Image (spheres, grey):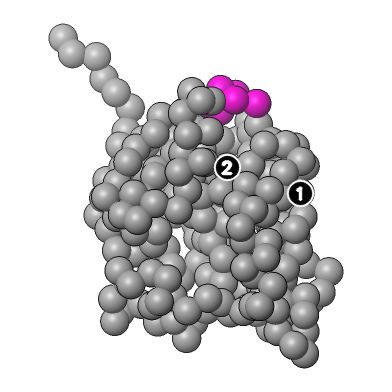
Amino acid sequence: MKTFVLVHGSWAGGWQWRPVRERLEARGHRVLAPTLSGMADRHHIVADDMGLHTHVEDVRALLVWEDLRDVVLVGHSYGGMVVTGAAAAQGARLSHLVYLDAFLPRADEAAWDVLPWQREAFQELRLPEKPWLIRPVDQKTFFPELGEDFDAELLTPMPIATHTDAVGAAPEPGAIPSTYVHATAPAYFDDSAARAAADGMRVVNVAAGHYVHWTHADVVADLLHELATPVTASA
């Protein structure tokens, strides 16, 4: 049995991991899929001083307070920023780090340093009454692969500081065994996947859209289970 901590992306919550979580739990793994502060079922506590550092602390504190060890830490999309910061702080508790079609920052980079085009594109998503919040993009327009079972009404605005805050420290390449899962149909994170390969990470290409954990939960769960299964030498 392995312990997985699954970190969601922009405008999302732990609920988006349900298809993967259920499959991993059916195989006997322990799975935690926290909702980050101010998002989804925790949106009622959102505040203008929340940002990336709040979310890094959410995950860092979870690892410590639950005394989690030998953890596979997974981040989807924006969650890649979060797991990078948490891994830098608590790397000794991790056995593997997984970026699921996610931002892969260097030390002191913000999300919009990794994807610069978002800096301008996201300005129109600011809420007029609360310009420190950015509303969700139209998921069905940008991610048409999502089916009717994906409830976009569960998405919530998130603080813009999640994308403007720099991550601070990041693990040194090779310090933690790491895998980058690159969704290629269509591809949004080519540069992060290339960076992962340059850093010596295992890169797995999946012919799926960005929400691969929702549309291809079997594929993602199988991959994560594989990472958790010790390789035994043949006789």
Q: Alpha-carbon distance for marks 2 and 1?
A: 12 Å
What segment carries the magenta color?
172-177
Q: How many marks?
A: 2
Q: Which mark is residue 103?
A: none
Q: In this image, 37 relative to 76: left or right?
A: right
* Residue 129: x %, y % from top left: 77, 90
Q: Which residue is mark 1?
A: 166
Residue 93 vs residue 188, the one in the foreground: 188
Identity, as a three-letter code, of the amino acid under mark 1: Ala
Q: Residue at x 49, y 54 (%)?
A: 76
For the view shown, which residue lies furthest in the top direction?
235
Identity, as a three-letter code, of the amino acid under mark 2: Leu
Q: Residue at x 45, y 53 (%)?
A: 188
Q: Is residue 179 visible?
A: yes
For the view shown, which residue lies furthest in the bottom direction?
129
- The part of the image, by quadrant, that contains residue 157 is bottom right
Q: Which mark is residue 104?
A: 2
Eyeballing the image, is 172 above or below 71?
above
* Residue 181: x %, y % from top left: 39, 43
In which quadrant will I find the C terminus? top left
